[in-house]
């Protein structure tokens, strides 16, 4: 009999069991709207016991497995069309509801794709919206498109709202994918999400620096200055370049990793999206996108890409999605796993023999990046704005930030770890210790109490996650993994602003907290229309827990495209990848004239010295 891994996502059959339990508990399906049915991760202390046996190769059919629990998120719809957001936890093996909580009405659940779909339908049925659209002269051959967006938050208490950003799409080409962001319309319909009614339509400021916060400076022909701004190859007005030669990266024998359900084995790593004796969990915990345009209603324009609406749909693994009636559907290939050549991992060339060595050195790189297309707003002809940059005719992209938060739950050769802050500092000139003035020292400071702090490039601040009870046999130092926090710009919104109160995690680079079951989200579990960060890292730090030699969590907030590289420090007794063979990628060729590209000091290097350029892996 095959058992699911404790971290395997729920199967369709398990999801159906959870759905049926909730339906029966509420006397039928009437009045219930399901949001999600997903695996509730086992408690850490239970899961660790299983993982240790798994990593030691000692699992048997008799090995106790943590209980398979489904977290069922749903709304109970009342007769007055109000909703009561509820979370039930169902033991899918015994088909019983083990606990339930009704979430305080001050919190709003994340938006669903179904609610986004309903937004456009509500707009088309709304006389208020239709009247607002009629205020503009939209040329023939254009179709209004509405992008639902989280409502954000301000000082006003509101019910569950969603707002829509409106654009006109040029459909004269007949291509459904033509870019509609080149034609922004200066209005935002606001939807009462539960009642499915447009409650108002906000008008947007379109002025420049000379207009301040004023509204109503635009004409009826707001699209006159706008331009197509197409990006599809078939719609571009110029030919594609033909000078790029093919780049061939091949794996003639397939990938080097194996996947069994959701368990991934690659070289000497074992992960389950992701756990090992180095990390218990590594995840992107949250990302907030605050906008810096103070003209209402832009003052509330702030998205939490995970908490407001989920991270979206990213071997590809399948995902089990939940429909509003609670039924499950399989979405194919939504989470990506692939093996790629990441350039040189480690290299040493013996200058006498010209032999180079490459390896896999036990590092982990987590990359965050913000890509895609900017959402623009309308700006009057010939004007410039201090709140953004004109990127096309009549199109202003507003100043905004992308602030990610990476959550690192270390398990460095065990689960009792200590966080060390390490910096390199100069030492005074002295006859005894530093007579020539070139000496410097590395100072270490253990983090004893939960706290936050910032990156320091001038001291090369390093965060070490170490196990003080395990020493490296060669160096004598505790085994550790380390990273250098990105010294990126933090949240620019004023600390007293609602934007800052909702995203306290974005106000420091590093946070160190003690592990608490269920505490996974940097900005708290509920960010949609929140007024402040509740249950996030600031609350965790405020507990002032002792975090020395215990189960600790590290969170890091970088901006935009950043690579956070966790490297072993005194963790291995020898180079962990010294046994990785190197070979030529014969599909690659030397660039013309490259036989001289590695000249140095008048010595022409032998062909073997070009292995790097030939794509050696």
Image (cartoon, rainbow, N blue to C red):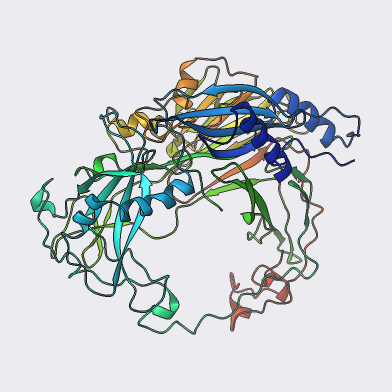
Asked if 204 appears above or below 478 in the picture, the reply is below
Q: Dividing the image into 4 quarters, which one contains the C terminus?
A: bottom right
In the rendered image, residue 327, in percent from the top left (x then y), is placed at 62, 45
Asked if 102 appears above or below 575 in the picture, the reply is above
Asked if 367 appears above or below 513 in the picture, the reply is below
- At x 72%, y 42%, the residue is 272
In the rendered image, residue 476, in percent from the top left (x then y), is placed at 74, 28
- At x 64%, y 36%, the residue is 19
Question: Front-most of 513 and 432?
Answer: 513
Question: Front-most of 177 and 99?
Answer: 99
Specify the quadrant of the image occupied by residue 217: bottom left
Q: Dividing the image into 4 quarters, which one contains the N terminus?
A: top right
User: Position of 394 compared to 566: left or right?
Assistant: left
Question: Front-most of 398 and 597?
Answer: 398
User: Position of 240 compared to 327: left or right?
Assistant: left
Asked if 430 appears above or below 317 in the picture, the reply is above
Question: Front-most of 589 and 500?
Answer: 500
In the rendered image, residue 209, in percent from the top left (x then y), is placed at 12, 52
Residue 440 shows in the view = no
| Total numbered labels | 0
- At x 74%, y 68%, the residue is 251
- At x 88%, y 29%, the residue is 63
Residue 458 shows in the view = yes
In the rendered image, residue 100, in percent from the top left (x then y), is placed at 59, 22
């Amino acid at each position: 009999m095959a058992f699911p891994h404790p971290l395997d996502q729920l199967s369709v059959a398990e999801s159906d069991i959870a759905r049926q339990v909730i339906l029966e508990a509420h006397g039928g399906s009437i009045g219930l709207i399901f949001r999600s049915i997903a695996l509730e991760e086992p408690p850490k202390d239970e899961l660790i016991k299983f993982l240790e046996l798994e990593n030691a190769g000692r699992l048997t059919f008799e090995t106790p497995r943590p209980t398979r629990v489904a977290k069922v998120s749903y709304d109970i719809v009342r007769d007055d069309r109000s909703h009561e957001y509820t979370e039930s936890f169902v033991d899918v093996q015994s088909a019983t509801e083990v606990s339930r909580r009704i979430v305080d009405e001050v919190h709003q659940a994340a938006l669903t794709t179904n609610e986004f779909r309903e937004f456009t339908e509500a707009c088309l049925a709304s006389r208020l919206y239709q009247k607002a659209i009629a205020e503009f002269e939209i040329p023939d051959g254009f179709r209004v498109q509405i992008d639902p967006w989280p409502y954000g938050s301000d000082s006003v208490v509101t019910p569950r709202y969603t707002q829509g950003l409106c654009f006109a799409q040029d459909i004269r080409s007949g291509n459904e994918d033509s870019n509609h962001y080149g034609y922004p319309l200066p209005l935002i319909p606001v939807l009462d999400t539960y009642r499915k009614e447009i409650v108002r339509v906000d008008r947007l400021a379109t002025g420049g620096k000379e207009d301040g916060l004023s509204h109503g400076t635009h004409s009826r022909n707001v699209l006159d200055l706008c331009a197509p701004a197409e990006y599809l190859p078939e719609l571009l007005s110029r030919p594609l370049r033909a000078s790029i030669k093919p780049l061939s990266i091949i794996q003639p024998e397939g990938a080097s990793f194996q996947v069994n359900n959701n368990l991934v084995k690659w070289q000497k790593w074992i992960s389950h999206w992701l756990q090992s004796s180095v990390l218990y969990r590594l995840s992107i915990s949250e990302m907030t996108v605050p906008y810096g345009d103070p003209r209402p209603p832009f003052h509330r324009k702030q998205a939490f890409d995970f908490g407001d609406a989920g991270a979206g749909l990213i071997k590809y693994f399948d995902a089990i999605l939940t429909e509003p009636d609670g039924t499950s559907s399989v979405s194919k290939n939504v989470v990506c796993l692939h093996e790629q050549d990441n350039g040189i991992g480690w290299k040493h060339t013996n200058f006498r023999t010209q032999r180079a060595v490459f390896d896999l050195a036990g590092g982990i790189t987590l990359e965050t990046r913000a890509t895609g297309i900017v959402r623009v707003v309308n700006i009057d002809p010939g004007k410039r704005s201090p709140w953004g940059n004109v990127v096309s005719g009549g199109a202003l992209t507003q100043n905004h930030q992308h602030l990610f938060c990476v959550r690192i739950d270390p398990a460095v050769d065990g689960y009792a770890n200590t966080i060390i802050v390490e910096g390199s500092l100069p030492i005074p000139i002295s006859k005894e210790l530093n007579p020539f003035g070139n000496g410097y020292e590395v100072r270490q400071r253990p983090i004893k109490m939960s706290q936050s702090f910032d990156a320091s490039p001038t001291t090369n601040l390093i965060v070490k996650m170490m196990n003080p009870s395990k020493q490296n046999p060669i160096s004598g130092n505790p085994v550790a993994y380390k990273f250098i926090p990105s010294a990126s710009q933090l949240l620019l919104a004023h600390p007293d602003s609602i934007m800052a109160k909702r995203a306290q995690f974005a106000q420091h680079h590093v946070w160190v907290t003690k592990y608490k079951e269920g505490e996974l989200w940097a900005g708290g579990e509920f960010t949609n229309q929140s007024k402040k960060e509740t249950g996030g890292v600031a609350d965790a730090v405020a507990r002032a827990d002792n975090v020395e030699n215990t189960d600790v969590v590290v969170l890091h907030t970088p901006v935009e495209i950043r690579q956070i590289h966790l490297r072993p420090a005194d963790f291995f007794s020898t180079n962990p990848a010294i046994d990785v063979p190197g070979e030529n990628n014969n599909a690659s060729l030397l660039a013309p004239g490259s036989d001289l590209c590695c000249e140095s000091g008048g010595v022409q290097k032998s062909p073997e010295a070009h292995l790097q350029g030939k794509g050696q892996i």
